[in-house]
Every structure is written in structure tokens, then in C-alpha cells.
């Protein structure tokens, strides 16, 4: 009988004195561990169309504990995707294997930003492969729906199978799940797999794209400022930098010392750290207001750590914790998000008389259409003045 393989299970298992013993995983069918008197290795096996059961050792010469269960399970997923996926079985391939093979292919093509690739992997693991986690609370109905969906042949999946999963999980996650599934089926169509897309019209199914328009008013901005100030650094410093620069949350929380020139008052964001980096491969230079420089200078330097704002776990970058945001939300009720601060800066820049071309580029947006074609000015000086004018208005607002 299959069991959930873990490093602890493998470590404690008593190996046979002679011969070999196999234990198979209950998560990835065909993935197992082989115990012999001297060696513990990982294997993967599958059934071919003619009924044969090939078996391969995973990890090359690496053996447990040189290779962990999690690493070996990922190798098994990849190998099963190769031998049982779309390339070998066409539309008969189970959806979980076909999507895993597609995911591996997308990684080799490097078409996704790293953060998005992690999200796609998590969605496939949880809502197609049915890998359960103690952090993910799923109802029995959701688990059954996911299991049914993942084990169906790719061309056999119906809209009802997809909606059974979507209706059993959170709306936001459901929207992401629909988007990723739709991308997968579009890719299969391009490869010549003739099948309907059961994830189609995802925006209509999930209520359409919700375009946010919430912009913190002056009073709300001040109350938020005070609420984060009570939380102290690094929360307050990160909030200040979000307000004063208009940068995106991950850009601020992942700020590195080597990106900064505090004497010149500039922060240079490399393309790989920007959402629009592929479309705009030039470094993005942000002029830092004195308030932003002071916030950075307040941060203690952690030895051998590249990050300005570092988290609770050793040398990882900082991020806002849920308890912190819960306390701030209690102090400042309403439907606000940290990303709304970019909209606040953009709106106030218009009020300050800053031109649309300059304000848009302060947000990291490229000029588009004919304006982008004909206007080749770099606006570096104008953007610097805009950031400083915005910073001055924030300082006056908070002081008042």
C-alpha cells in the first residue's frame, strides 16, 4: 500500500538484510524508494501501452540522503511527464502529467519570470496534482474534485470538471487557476492536439477582471503613515519607500545595497527585478527624496546580507507579515492595498502639475503608441524633480 514518502520516513525505515524492498508514494503514482542492505535510492516506474512496466533510478549516482524526497519527487514528475505526457500519449495523457510536462518545457524556454514560475508550479501542485499541504485548507469536496480533474485524460476534461474545482476554492485562486489552465490548453492547440479548452472565457466565469480604482485620500495616507510608524522598522521604512518612490512592493522589499548610491540619492533597479524588465531592458533610476534616504540609512546592516530590509529568517529579504497588515487594517479600515499607493502618487503628481509623460515614467510605465514612437526624450531630470516634488508634498502633508 502506498504511503506519503518523506525524508523522515525514509531515514527511519529499517532496510532489509538481504534483497530489496520498495515503498511507493501515495502522491505521485509510480514514484518510490528502493531499500537495499547498503543503499537507499529513488525510482520511478510506469505502465506502457503494451502492458510493460519500465523502472528507472532517479538522481543518477546520487543516493539518499544526498538527494531528498522532495527533489526525487520533482524528478519523478518530470520523467513521468516525458514518458506519459502529451509527446508520447497525445490527448490520452492524464491532465496532471500533461501540465507538468508543459510546465517543464516552459521553464526550459525561460518564458516566465521566476516569481510567476513559482506561482504556476504551486497552482499545478495544489489544484491539479492534488499535493496537499498543512498550510492549504481544502474541503473533502475540493480534494475529490481536484483528484478527478488531474487523473482525467487531457481531451476528456469537461467544463464541469474544471468548475467543480473552481467552485470549491477561493475566488482569487480560482481566477489564477483558470488563467493557467487556459494557457496550457492554448499551448496544446498550437502543438496540434485537437481538443476544446474547458478553461475558456475565464474572465466571464470568475466575474471579469476587477480593475481597482481605490486611491487613498490625504487623510487616509496620513493615518496609514502613522499606523506603520507605530509598527517600527523595517515595516515603516518599507512603507515610506513605497509611498515616496511609487515602486512595486517586491521591488522595495527586495532592495539591495549595491543598487543604491546614497550620496547621489539614487536607486538603480536592474531589469531582472522589474515587472516590465523584458520589455524595458534598461536599468530604472529612481531619484530618492531625503525622507527616503533617511529611511534607508536607519536600517541596520546585516553582515554578508545583500538586502537593505531583511526578514526574520537569516539573510532573506523582508516582506510584510500578515499580523502586521491585520493590525494596520484594524487601524485604517477599508478596501486598501499597498499597491494603491502607486495610484496615490500618480494622482497627486497630476495635482502638482507634473506632466502625464513624466508621471507615468515615474511609475516605470513606458510611453506607448505614437507618443512612445515620436517622443525619445529620456526625462531623467524631469523625473527627478517630480519625485522630489512629490516627496516634499508628502512631508508637508504628514507634518500637518
Image (tube, rainbow, N blue to C red):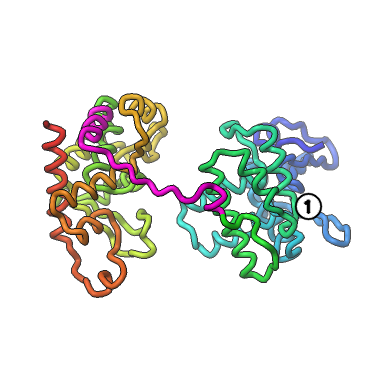
Asked if the magenta segment contains residue 285, the reply would be: no
Residue at image coords 60%, 54%? 181
**Magenta stretch bounds:** 202-228
Q: Nearer the viewer, residue 39 or 301?
A: 301
Quadrant in which residue 226 is drawn: top left
Residue 372 in the figure: left or right of residue 84: left
List x then y, in percent, for residue 295: 20, 37
Where's the N terminus, which quadrant? top right
Is 320 located above or below residue 120 in the figure? Answer: above
Where's the C terminus, which quadrant? top left
What residue is disc 1 on?
Answer: 45
Q: Nearer the viewer, residue 281 or 311?
A: 281
Asked if the magenta segment contains residue 215, the reply would be: yes
Q: Nearer the viewer, residue 255 or 71?
A: 255
Residue 236 in sight: yes
List x then y, in percent, for residue 267: 23, 51
Amino acid at each position: 500500500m502506498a504511503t506519503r514518502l518523506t525524508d523522515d520516513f525514509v531515514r527511519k525505515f529499517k532496510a532489509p538484510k538481504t534483497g530489496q524492498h520498495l515503498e511507493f508514494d501515495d502522491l505521485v503514482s509510480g514514484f518510490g524508494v528502493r531499500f537495499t542492505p547498503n543503499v537507499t535510492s529513488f525510482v520511478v516506474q510506469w505502465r506502457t501501452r503494451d502492458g510493460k512496466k519500465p523502472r528507472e533510478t532517479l538522481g543518477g549516482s546520487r543516493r539518499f540522503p544526498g538527494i531528498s524526497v522532495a527533489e526525487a519527487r520533482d524528478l519523478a514528475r518530470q520523467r513521468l511527464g516525458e514518458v506519459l505526457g502529451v509527446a508520447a500519449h497525445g490527448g490520452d495523457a492524464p491532465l496532471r502529467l500533461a501540465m507538468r510536462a508543459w510546465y517543464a518545457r516552459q521553464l526550459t524556454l525561460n518564458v516566465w519570470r521566476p516569481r510567476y514560475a513559482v506561482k504556476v508550479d504551486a497552482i499545478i501542485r495544489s489544484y491539479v496534482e492534488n499535493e496537499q499541504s498543512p498550510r492549504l485548507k481544502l474541503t473533502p469536496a475540493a480534494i475529490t474534485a481536484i483528484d478527478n480533474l488531474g487523473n482525467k485524460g487531457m481531451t476528456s476534461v469537461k467544463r464541469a470538471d474544471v468548475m467543480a474545482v473552481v467552485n470549491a476554492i477561493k475566488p482569487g485562486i480560482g481566477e489564477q487557476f483558470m488563467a493557467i489552465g487556459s494557457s496550457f490548453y492554448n499551448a496544446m492547440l498550437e502543438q496540434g492536439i485537437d481538443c476544446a479548452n474547458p478553461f475558456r472565457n475565464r474572465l466571464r466565469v470568475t466575474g471579469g477582471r476587477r480593475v481597482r480604482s481605490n486611491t487613498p485620500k490625504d487623510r487616509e495616507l496620513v493615518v496609514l503613515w502613522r499606523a506603520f510608524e507605530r509598527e517600527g522598522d523595517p515595516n515603516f521604512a518599507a512603507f515610506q519607500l513605497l509611498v515616496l518612490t511609487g515602486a512595486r512592493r517586491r521591488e522595495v522589499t527586495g532592495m539591495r545595497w549595491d543598487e543604491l548610491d546614497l550620496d547621489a540619492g539614487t536607486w538603480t533597479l536592474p531589469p531582472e527585478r522589474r515587472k516590465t524588465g523584458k520589455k524595458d531592458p534598461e536599468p530604472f533610476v529612481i531619484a530618492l527624496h531625503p525622507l527616503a534616504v533617511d529611511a534607508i540609512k536607519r536600517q541596520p546592516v546585516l553582515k554578508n546580507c545583500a538586502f537593505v530590509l531583511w526578514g526574520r529568517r537569516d539573510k532573506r529579504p523582508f516582506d510584510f507579515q500578515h499580523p502586521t497588515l491585520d493590525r494596520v487594517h484594524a487601524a485604517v479600515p477599508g478596501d486598501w492595498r499597498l499597491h494603491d499607493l502607486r495610484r496615490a502618487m500618480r494622482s497627486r503628481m497630476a495635482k502638482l502639475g507634473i506632466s502625464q509623460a513624466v508621471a507615468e515614467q515615474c511609475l516605470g510605465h513606458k510611453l506607448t503608441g505614437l507618443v512612445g514612437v515620436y517622443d525619445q526624450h529620456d526625462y531623467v531630470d524631469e523625473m527627478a524633480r517630480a519625485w522630489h516634488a512629490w516627496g516634499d508634498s508628502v512631508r508637508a502633508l504628514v507634518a500637518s
